[in-house]
Amino acid sequence: MKNPVLLGAAATLFLASCENFEGGTNTPTNQFIRELPEAVLEIAAPYQDLSAVRIDPADGCYVYRHVGPVETTFLPLRSVRGRPICTQRPDAAPEDDEATNS
């Protein structure tokens, strides 16, 4: 009785591992920005692939596709100084406004 249950559980786990999870959404994850803003092009470090850039919906920062010898992954797009390049969130209120209202 235990063998068929274990076999069924193992088969389910094996088939579930074949699914490609990249963000948990049903939207296509390979939509790249066709033309980057001029400001981003000016501050981006030169060693990054700017032909495959998108905005990470989790934090609003630009990420680029890095094709390595073993895997392809998305890394944060960084400036020449090494800082990540992010967009401004529309729901984020400036801290100065909170200080002046109190």
Image: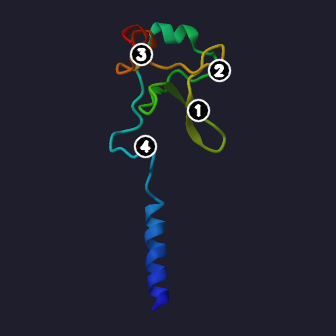
Which sits earlier in the primary sequence, circle 2 or circle 1? Answer: 2
Which residue is the site of mark 1? 66
Quarter-wise, where is residue 34 in the image?
A: top left
Which of the labelled discs sits on residue 74, or is there none? none
Point out residue 7 in the picture as x, y percentages from the top left corner: 48, 80
3 and 1 marks in contact (CB < 8 Å): no
Residue drawn at (47%, 7%) of the image: 38
Q: Quadrant of the C terminus?
A: top left
2 and 3 marks in contact (CB < 8 Å): no
In the figure, is residue 84 to the left or right of 32? right
Front residue of 42/84: it is 84
Mark 4 Cα-neighbour bin, 10 Å: few <14, some 14–19, many ≥20: few
Secondary structure at badge 2 equals loop
Point out residue 5 in the picture as x, y percentages from the top left corner: 44, 83
Name of the residue lying farthest toward the bottom: 1
Looking at numbered disc 2 in the image, what kind of residue is underneath it?
Tyr
Q: How far is mark 2 from mark 1, CA to CA?
A: 10 Å
Secondary structure at badge 4 equals loop
Point out residue 36 in the picture as x, y percentages from the top left corner: 45, 15
Which of the labelled discs sits on residue 23, or is there none? 4
Q: Quadrant of the N terminus?
A: bottom left
Secondary structure at badge 1 equals strand
2 and 1 marks in contact (CB < 8 Å): no
Which sits earlier in the primary sequence, circle 4 or circle 2? Answer: 4
Looking at numbered disc 1 in the image, what kind of residue is underneath it?
His
Which residue is the site of mark 2? 47
Which sits earlier in the primary sequence, circle 3 or circle 4? Answer: 4
Which residue is the site of mark 3? 35
Looking at numbered disc 3 in the image, what kind of residue is underneath it?
Glu
Q: How many marks?
A: 4
Q: How far is mark 3 from mark 1, CA to CA?
A: 18 Å
